[in-house]
Image: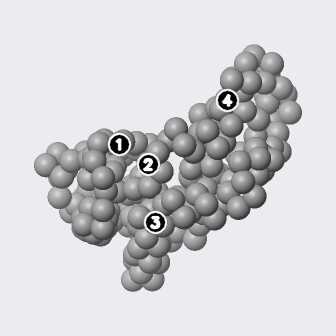
Amino acid sequence: FVATEKGFPGSANLLAPYPNKLVYAIVVREPTRRFVSYYFWKWRRKDLYAVATKRIRGNSDVAEVSDDAPSFGRFVEREQPLDAYYVRRLLGMGERAVVVDETALAKAKDVLRRTFSVILLTERLGDFGPLVKRTLGWASSDFDAFRAKRNPAPNLKLLEAWRQDWNEEIARRMPLDRDFYAYAAGLAEERMKAG
């Protein structure tokens, strides 16, 4: 089993998926949530006091960022382009190497459809237990274990300091990601029902 947060082997380095032998799985996350989560993860407080407090209290309810963290607005501008996260990874492109267009999106969708036997959505992991059990031959798929670890919610004040419509604005800047996510969600649903 290979798990990777970033990067995906080029098609020349992949073995063809064989039913019941080799299974590629991917977990896809709603684009705006993924980007916001990335900000709070990248700039999380790492000082000893913050770490000790989290261990004593467990995860706090609201995510904290370090004192040297850029504002969310600056982070958005630094991370350009925001769009095409999954397209770049599935096609082996660099972070900012080339402009990604509808043709690249179509190729990434094709890689997703042909290569991945299991497509999961972060927001609905529990729904896909039966698919995972059926595909991998597992007796159980305890996705409830993921829910046992509760991450703190994003600090909305930091997002709203950039702009009140932060959610819509980030989504507006990610048309290819939203299209890819919708396609992945549809494909995941279709495979789950194929049973």
Give residue 175's mark.
3
Give the amino acid at mark 3.
Pro
Relative to residue 135, is residue 97 depicted above or below? above
Q: Secondary structure at mark 2?
A: loop
Q: Tell me the crowding category of disc 3: few under 14, some 14 to 19, or many 20 or more residues within 10 angstroms, Cα based.
A: some
Q: Which quadrant holds residue 110?
A: bottom left
Q: Secondary structure at mark 3?
A: helix
Give the amino acid at mark 1.
Arg
Between 193 and 134, the residue placed more toward the observer is 193
Give the amino acid at mark 4.
Ala
Q: Earlier in the sequence, mark 3 or mark 1?
A: 1
Q: Secondary structure at mark 1?
A: loop
Whole-angstrom CA distance, mark 3 to mark 1, is: 16 Å
Between 95 and 173, the residue placed more toward the observer is 173
Give residue 81's mark.
2
Whole-angstrom CA distance, mark 4 to mark 2, is: 20 Å
Give the amino acid at mark 2.
Pro
Q: As drawn, is 18 to the left or to the right of 45? A: left
Q: Earlier in the sequence, mark 3 or mark 2?
A: 2
Check the image and name the residue furthest to the left.
12
The percent position of residue 52, horizontal first and vertical second, equals 79, 22
Q: Are marks 3 and 4 in contact (CB under 8 Å)?
A: no
Residue to which mark 1 is pinned: 96
Whole-angstrom CA distance, mark 3 to mark 4, is: 27 Å
Residue to which mark 4 is pinned: 69
Q: Which quadrant holds residue 45?
A: top right
Q: As drawn, is 117 to the left or to the right of 166? A: left
Q: As drawn, is 141 to the left or to the right of 195? A: right
Q: Earlier in the sequence, mark 2 or mark 1?
A: 2
Between 86 and 174, the residue placed more toward the observer is 174
Q: As drawn, is 49 to the left or to the right of 185? A: right
